[in-house]
Each structure stands twice: as C-alpha cells, then as structure tokens.
Amino acid sequence: MQAVILAAGEGKRMLPLTLNLPKPLLPVAGTPILERIIDALPSEITELIIVVGYKADLIQNYFGDLYKGRLITYVMQQEQKGTYHALLQVKEQLGERLYGRFLLLNADDLHGSHALSEATQNPLALIVAEHEDPTKFGIVLKNEDGTLKDVIEKPEVFDGAAEGEIGLVSTGAMVLDEKIFKYEVKPATNGEFYLPEALRQLAAEYPVQLVEQKEWVPIGYPEDLEKAEESLGVE
C-alpha cells in the first residue's frame, strides 16, 4: 500500500523558521517532522509518494529514494494551489500506479501509529480527532453508523451542540482510492482547490469510516513545535 504525503507548502505561518528549511524538515526534539510522520506509518505502507514544492531539494536530499526499506517517489507541485490540486499532481504523474487504496497525510502533523494502522484496514477512512478550537480545522459530522456525513471547512461560527458533534475535526489524514479523482472541485475564494469538497462528494456515494486519533499534534505555528515535544515527553 502506498502513502501520499503532501509536503509542498511554503510554511508561511512558521516564519522565520522556514526561511532556510521547508516546514517538514523542522525538528521536533532533534528529528524532522516528516521523519517522525514516516516512522509512525504502519507496516502496510511499503512505498511513499511525497508531493514537494518549496525547497524540494532539501527534502529529497534528506530522505533519498529509499528510506528504511520504503521506496520514495517525489512529485513536484509547481504552484501551491490547495490540497486537492496537490493530490491531482500524483494522478497526473503516476496514473494507474496509484489506483487502489492509499493513505494520504499532511507533512506537518504528528500521528500516533495505532490510528493510522486502523484506518488502513478500511476501504475508505478519515482520521478525526477532538480539538478545543474546531473552527481552525474541518469540522466533521458523522452518520449514526460511524461513517462520514459532512465536512465543514473552517467555519467562522459553528453550533456544534445543535449538530451533535462538538469538537470533532478532520486531521487531514485519510484512506482513499481512485474514486476521489472523479469529482469536480471548484476553486475556493482564494483560487485554491481543497480536498474536503471532493471528500464530501465521495462520502455522499460511498461509506467513509471515521477513525479517531488520540495522538494527533497539528503543527501550524512555531509554538506548536514545543507542544509537539511535550506530547513526546520531551522537556
């Protein structure tokens, strides 16, 4: 099974730390974020496809074409135009090699290995987590059978109590297959193309199992690096 890791962004919110390093290579307790992400992947993942862009050469030089027994293919996203656009670059570059299930992750979130492994046991899955400020992420609504009902992308205001889902958000990690490419995704107001719109259409046709992640550390700002180290028990 392949894992597709989105690592092309400029990491503007992490400035000035990303002036000389791409965000995925910023260290958490001495180890780059992306290395920790890869090390947490389950044994089912035998090949990595990393979408790169900003300072791509540093990522490629660090991991090479083979990392701890896993082959790595790099796909360039020339313009950072959103997560769905990034995923489309993989389809265009690799074609039918990708067809079949794959695990998709962002290169700036730490994940516990158990939930990742559990997700790979499902045909389609979205890894979710509880968060104290769900409006920063894609808020997830679920069906009674535990599958995905809807994703509300970063709403300014959300009445979670009315919907029965308080603080459940998408971590951006999911198990997908070739069906994700059949949907038309319209650009957001900023001109970028985002995965939640395609995921919403996918969930309307096929069951997407929700898998809760207890060990998720999103890293968006410099202070989050310290939080990540605390989560690892580093003082």
Image: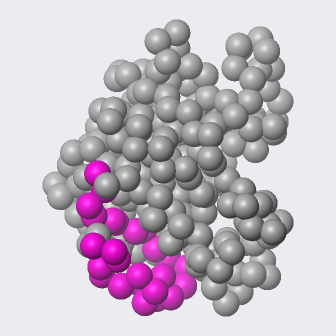
**How far from the left and from the top, in percent, is residue 71?**
26, 72
Along the line of sight, which residue is nearer the eye, 106 or 88? 106
- Furthest-left residue in view? 96
Magenta-span inclusion, residue 66: yes
Say if residue 218 shows up in the picture.
yes
Name the residue located 75 percent from the left edge and 72 percent from the top edge.
14
Q: In which quadrant is the C terminus drawn? A: bottom right
Along the line of sight, which residue is nearer the eye, 80 or 189? 80
Magenta-span inclusion, residue 149: no
Query: Can you say whether 17 is above or below 174 in the image?
Result: below
Name the residue located 68 percent from the left edge and 74 percent from the top edge.
29
Query: Can you say whether 92 is above or below 170 in the image?
Result: below
Magenta part of the chain? 44-69
Along the line of sight, which residue is nearer the eye, 86 or 1? 1
Classify residue 224 by image quadrant. Answer: bottom right
Say if residue 79 shows up in the picture.
no
Classify residue 155 by image quadrant. Answer: top right
**How far from the left and from the top, in percent, is residue 2?**
29, 56
Give the side of residue 74 with respect to residue 110, left or right: left
Give the side of residue 30 with respect to residue 6, left or right: right
Give the side of residue 91 with respect to residue 136, left or right: left
Name the residue located 38 percent from the left edge and 22 percent from the top edge.
207
**How far from the left and from the top, in percent, is residue 194?**
54, 48
**How far from the left and from the top, in percent, is residue 77?**
44, 71
Tally the marks.
0
Name the residue located 33 percent from the left edge and 65 percent from the top edge.
48
